[in-house]
Every structure is written in structure tokens, then in C-alpha cells.
Image: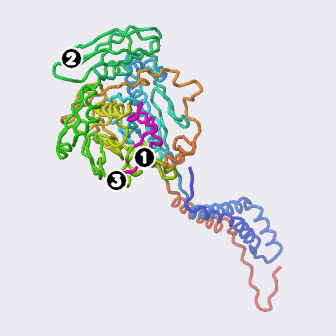
Amino acid sequence: MLSFAAPAFLFGLLALPVVVWLHRLRVRRERRVWAGTFLWRRAREQGRTRPRFLRTLLLLLQLLAVTALVLAAAQPRWNAPGPPLRVLVIDASAGMAATDGASSEAARERDDVVAGATRTDVAFAVARELAAEGGPIAVVRGGLEPRLALAPTDDGAALDALASAWTAGDAGSDRERALVLARDVAAAHDGPAELHWLADRPPPSAAGVHLHPLAGEGRNVGVTGFERIAGQAWVRVSSTWPQPLEVPLELLRDGTVVASTTLVVPARGDAATSLPVGDGPGGPSPLQARIVPPEGDVLDLDDVAWAPSDEVTVLLDRPFDALERALFAVPGVRVRVVAASAARSLPADLRVLHDPSFGPAPEGATLLLPERTGPAVAVRTWRWDRTDPLLRFVDLRDLIVAVPDPAPLDEGVDWTTAVHGLVDGDEDAAPVPLLQRRERDEGAVVRLAFHPARGDLTLRPAFPTLVVNLLDEVRGRQRVRLGEALPDDATGDGVVRAADGTGAGVARALRPGPLRTGDRVWLASLLDEETTRLAGPEAFPAELARTPSAAPAAGEAAAEAEGAAADGEVDGAPMDAEFDLVPWLLALAVLLLLAEWWGHAHGFRRPSAPRLPRFGRGGRDPG
């Protein structure tokens, strides 16, 4: 593509008519020396024999020379396109580990896919085929946390190394963020780029994206729910098979079967059951749920799930009778009342601290309470977030509590307010935050603007329900979803350290099982119903084009392209190879001017006229 660095100089082409006028003026003013009729006749005959096109040729050379000089002043550049960058988004959700890749649409288009290949195997077969076409390749790993797995490179060995280390096992995929990241990579490339989507589910927007459907036709059954509370284990099994199934189910503790049954799962439906499990001889310990899938099941990541033990250690920095009774009523909870310094330092699953200043909370889940004494105002609950897991089945209607005056909580940026109240009797007052929480990697912090003993909260059914919900969140801290990032010291059979685009290792749980970080045990399970219900060919409807539709160039930030719904590949960025035409145009102009000068000097040279006799003084004409 031709471009100009100084296009304003192209107005110099308007001088071409002036060149034509000057040329014609020079031709008309050409002088002829003659001394008689016979010399005029000879000059006329010489003009007939001279080629008329010579003058036109000289004019053409002049015009071309001026044109070359004007174009050189405009600084033209010739951009030669190179091979495009192909940005591949390869899904890494657990569904891509299904062994029905050979039945996908992308596999039917090639002959190198064997029976039993996973959907991921087909994805990398397509990736190698695209890499063989030439040009750089970049790979975005789509999962719970999309990231650049392979920076743009022409090295085919790097793609092979990535394929050998690749593990699909995330409990879901953030497809929108993966697409935005791919567009960012394409926009940052200094050249043309293409986006390729290799997944078993379509992207949020298919405009400008090459689709490679990897959804197969396999069937699957797996554990999609596993909870344990009060000596009971609840298990749910989901199926995509077109006929009912009898699925054997076993519950194990430390490798020993403690309960078993056979679930009858309806066609493309769910079945659930509850089984008593109790505690083991060594006390509460994690449980494992395991099913025996039928022959032909294509995914094994959801055949096993884990549930944490019921045992929870709670430390209180001072006695609190109502809270202790509510805690002792929950099986598997151990309660200890210790000094304030010990409550902050001893290991525990939950700490209850009286901290009127609401200072920094220690590591782990913490409940912060104000003092029980001091000036206070009556506050009636106004509204609360019923979707917050901490407030499930908690009825706070017309609850009156005593909030210290002034109120200890404000609407902080890092805190989420779940309960608001109004000063009793003052409807014009601003809402008062009553319960706030903040999520941390080391455990959530919940703080109350009131002490539960000051008011009627401890006399209501809402109080023990609130305590049970808090304990459930503490128990849930032992669980991780497949694909979640783990601390660097995590160890276990399911831990995979996948290299990202910078080469840094990130520990993730990509197989179900127990993991350990220091003195803490994590339990990794899939438990994702959408993944268990594998996407089939119907996920890519016929009206969804397989080739990208027209889309504007993505030369700016990908977020702007998303906001304008201009999803497309990068076509308007600078090309790979650039040639400067200025020296060539200057050289051409010089050659044209030299040719014009030579043609004018030699092409119009007249033959020498015969010498005329000299006339002396008083002489006469010899004729």
C-alpha cells in the first residue's frame, strides 16, 4: 500500500501545465538563419525529415522529471504486507478434556485426529496447521483467569512445548475476558492480525473471529453437588445421556468406604441423595464422593468430588454466652475462650474479637464486634442484602439494636455493606451501616456496628441462622475450584504450574483431590453443572458464520473496539515491510533530465549550411 509522509507537496503536480506552456514557447521561438529562397526551402525540407514525435518525447521526459521530483518531495512509502499474526484463543475449561474430540466439526475437516482424542488435542492440531501457514502465532489460555500462554512467536517448537504442557481443567471459562485479551494482543501487534476461537462454546461476539467448533457428541455423567453438614452428606449427580442410568455412588473417608448407594439418574436429568457419614475414628476428616460412570463416559474430572470435614475451631477473646450456645449447637465446632493476644495468634478457623477501633484483623476468618457498654442509640433495621450468603434465611425485619454513638462504621471503599438501619424515630437521618464484610485471600472479615447482646437479635431465630451461615463460609474456605490460583507452596497430585506469557509459574489445581499449603489442606473439586453438561454441536448454530464477518481495524485499544461493537481482526495497523521510494524517485528525475538535455542538444542539431561567398567592398552578387 502506498502512503505519503508529506502529501501536501502533491499540489506541485499543478505545475505540469506550466512545463507544457514553456516547452511550446521554446519551440515557437526557435530561430532559423537563411539567406535566400533556396536556404528557406532547404530548412523546410529538413523540418519535414525530422521526426515530429521527438518534440513530444522531450516534453514527456520533462513532465516525468517534474512528476518524479514532486512525488519525492511528498516522501512516498510503499508498505508491503507480511504474514498476519494469528492470535489463538484455546479454551482450557474442564469440558475441553472430554475424549470426544474426533466427533467435533473441527476434527472432521482434517485426517490427523485419532479416535479418543480430546477436544484440546483437536485444538492444537488446528493450531499447528495455522502455524504451518507462516507468520507469528500467539496463544491465549481461556479459563477462569484468561492469560497469555504464548507470546507472539514464529518458533514452532514453542507451540509444541506449550501443547505438551497444556492441561484443561478449569471449572468454567471467562470467555468475554479471553476475547478482550486476544484483541489486546492483536492490537499491540505492528502488522495485520487474525483472531481464531478454538473452543467448545462460541465467543460472546463472533464478528471478525475465525471459529473452530470443538464441541463433540459424547455423553457424560458426573457429580455436580456435594455438601456435608450435621453428620449427613448430600450428593447430586447430573447426566447428559439420552436414557436413564443406574450410577453406583460411594462415599469414602481416608480411602475406606463409609456409605454407598445406587442412584437412578433420569435421562438428561439430575438425581440427589443424602447419606449418614458421622465421624471417623480419628475425628472429623474430609469425605470423597466417587461414582462409577457407564462405559462411553467422555469426562472423568467430575467423577470424584471432595467435601471438607465438619470440624471448625472458633476462638473468642472474651466470654459471650449467647454466641457460645449457638456455636455449640452446630456439630463439629470446637469453641475456646482465650486471652485477646492468644485469640489473635493461635491457629483457628474463626476468630471473634472485641475491637472497638476495628483495627487490622489477623489472618483467617474474623468477626469483629464493638464493646458491650458505652453510649448508644437505638437503630431499626431498614434493608439488607438477601442475596449475601451470610444472610441466607436470616429475617431481620423490625430488628432494633444499640449502635454506639457516634456510629463506628462508615461506607468504606474496601467494605461491602450488607445491612443498613435507620435511627429509631428519626426518618430523616442517613442510613447507618450495621453489618459489613471484606473478602481477603487469608479469610473474610465481618464486622458489626452493634454488639448482638445489646438488643433483641440473640432472642430471634435469625441469630443462630446467622452463626450457621458464618460457619458454612469458614468451612468453604477449605474448598477451591479447579483452575483457581493457589499459594506458591501448594503441593498435591492435582497441582499444575502452567507457564504464562512471561514464563512465570502459576500454581493451579487442575485435578480433583486434596492439596496442601504449609499446615493447611485444600480440597479441589469440579462441581460445575455447566461443565458436566458438555456443550454439543448445537452450541454453534448454523447461522453462526465460521468465517469472520467484516469488522473495523483494531488499531486502538480493545476496550474501545468492544464498546463500539466493532469486533474484528486487525487490518489497519502498519504493515510489516516498508520501502522508502524517495531515493529512487530522485535518481529517476535526474536520469529523465539528462535524457531530455541530450535529446534537445543532439536531436535538433541542424546540418551545417554551405559557406556563402564573401562580399567585398563594392563587390557584387555572383548570381
3D distance between C-alphas at marks 1 and 3: 13 Å
Whichever of labels 3 and 2 marks the residue nearer the N terminus, that label is 2
Q: Position of residue 339 (x, y in %)?
A: 17, 44
Q: Is residue 308 left or right of residue 293?
A: left
Q: Quadrant of residue 98?
A: top left
Residue that appears at 70% across and 61% down: 54
Q: Nearer the viewer, mark 3 or mark 2?
A: 3
Q: Which residue is mark 1?
A: 379
Quadrant, the C terminus:
bottom right
What residue is disc 2 on?
A: 255
Amino acid type for the residue under numbered disc 1: Val
Q: What amino acid is labelled 3 in the image?
A: Pro
Work out whether 534 lies above or below 194.
above
Q: Is residue 382 magenta?
A: yes
Rendered residue at 30%/23% (across/down):
229
x, y (%) of residue 389? 39, 34
**Residue 539 as seen in the image, left or right of residue 145:** right
In the depicted structure, whether residue 198 falls above or below residue 252: below
Q: Residues within 10 Å of mark 1 (few under 14, many from 20)?
A: many
Q: Which residues are magenta?
A: 375-400
Q: Residue at x 54, y 40 (%)?
A: 568
User: Are the residues flagged by discs 2 and 1 in contact, CB closer than 8 Å?
Assistant: no
Circle 3 Cα neighbour tier, 10 Å, few/some/many (<14 / 14–19 / ≥20): few
Mark 3 lies on a secondary structure that is: loop
Q: In the rendered image of this protein, does residue 467 appear above or below residue 281?
A: below
Q: Is residue 44 magenta?
A: no
| SS type, badge 1 | strand
The residue beneath circle 3 is 375
For the residue pair 605 and 584, the one nearer the viewer reads as: 584
Q: Is residue 115 visible?
A: no
Kindly report the distance in space between the C-alpha atoms of the residues bearing marks 2 and 1.
53 Å
